[in-house]
Image: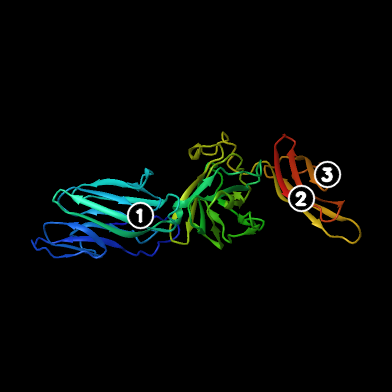
Amino acid sequence: MKRRRRSRGSGLLSRRKAILALGAAATGGALMRTGAFSNVTADRFVDLSATGDANAVLGIEGYADAGITPTFSNNSKASMDVTLDSNEDVEFDVGDNDSWELVPVTFGLSAGGSIDVALRDGGNAGTDSDIEITATNLDGFSFEGTRNFKIPASSTVKEIEPTVTATGNSGKYEFELENKGSATVTLTEIGVVETSNSGAVKVGGKNNDDIFINVNTGSSIVNNVITIGGSRVPLSTNVDLAPGSSNAIKFEFDRFRDSSDNNADMKNDDVKIDVAFSDGSSTTLDLCVNGGCSFDNGGDGSDGGDGGGTGPVVNNFTAQSNKVPGSTDEVQIDWDVEDQGGTALDQVVIDVTGDVTDQKTIDVSGTTANGSTTYDSSNNPSGNANITVSNVDGDQATESTTY
């Protein structure tokens, strides 16, 4: 039987077959080798063992590998009912079609039939759970037993509506991930499956882009360009995601780009990401800006995407608090802007709040501009800074930072 793994993208996971088999022979003896099972009832020889015997009464494949969706197979000549239960909160998805149910869960298997049954942590199970299995068929065979099932880390992560911190054509995209399970999971790879902006083809690839940032720590954690629709790329530093909303981690793509390496306008665009974990499991997550993803709109402008960078962009904007000799310190603002569509720029507005409060409107011309401003302040100043660049057509782009 061909197995369907819970992974996609870069490479195949090592496959550790784990089959729980209930073998039956056509002898009429009363001998039973029950192993870890109890309460076995049969009117013929029953052998409960770990084997790949194709004639096993009930086979369970993949339960010991978090990277494989478990499959239950009924190899008897009679229909069978199977019940799964646990002392922990475990949810099963019979048919692997997002129809999750908390234990106990009962399903039927026709003679010779099989079905995929996914599982996830329902609240307190962690990374594995002892599952109580009860099965009966119309031939009078029944048993009860327990096996330890691995719970994939990918099942515990839930996407949160992303916060896009840059408007216009900056190409940056921020979102958070929250661990809804009961055990810490470790992220190892990231990919982008698709976006609602058809002009965006990759993340990174110009101006020493940081590509993918752990905003909580301020560190860049991907060294390779992420191709949209391509394979996942490894994280240079794995990320541990602890359970609970207070431990949610914010991430940022820097930056989405089009085929000409221009910033792709991701304002109001949706993104589907592909995340892998240290246990070999993976999942895709939809980051929907307006509550519902619209990946089929082609980025034709109705969702804010314009298929690529064609207006003002902020290439660089930094605000830094500096120590200087004497009784005051300073805040230094540096900026660099351009219009990727070739339209003349008009104005740059810099707004600083906090220990320094100031707003400057700077008239600019041409398609590129840059500048630097220093403000005197009290010791160890801190606050926020915003920049808005506009062209003569009234198109704008905005960036924010802290100092």
Can you identify the residue that label 2 sits on? 335
* Direction right: furthest residue: 326
Q: Is residue 51 left or right of residue 230?
A: left
Amino acid type at mark 2:
Trp
Label 3 to label 2, Cα distance in Å?
18 Å
Q: For label 1, count other residues whose C-alpha is less than 10 Å away and answer few (under 14), some (14-19) or many (20+).
A: many
Tell me which residue sits at (67%, 56%) in the image.
Answer: 207
Q: For label 3, count other residues whose C-alpha is less than 10 Å away and answer few (under 14), some (14-19) or many (20+).
A: few
Residue situated in front as seen by the camera: 346 or 316: 316
Answer above or below: position of 37 versus 78: below
Colouring style = rainbow
Q: Which of pointers 2 and 1 lies earlier in the amino acid sequence?
A: 1
The answer to which quarter of the image holds residue 220 is bottom right
Q: For label 2, count other residues whose C-alpha is less than 10 Å away and answer few (under 14), some (14-19) or many (20+).
A: some
Determine the secondary structure under disc 2: strand
Image marks 3 and 2: residues in contact by CB distance under 8 Å: no
Label 3 to label 1, Cα distance in Å?
57 Å
Residue situated in front as seen by the camera: 294 or 33: 33
Can you identify the residue that label 3 sits on? 357
The answer to which quarter of the image holds residue 344 is top right
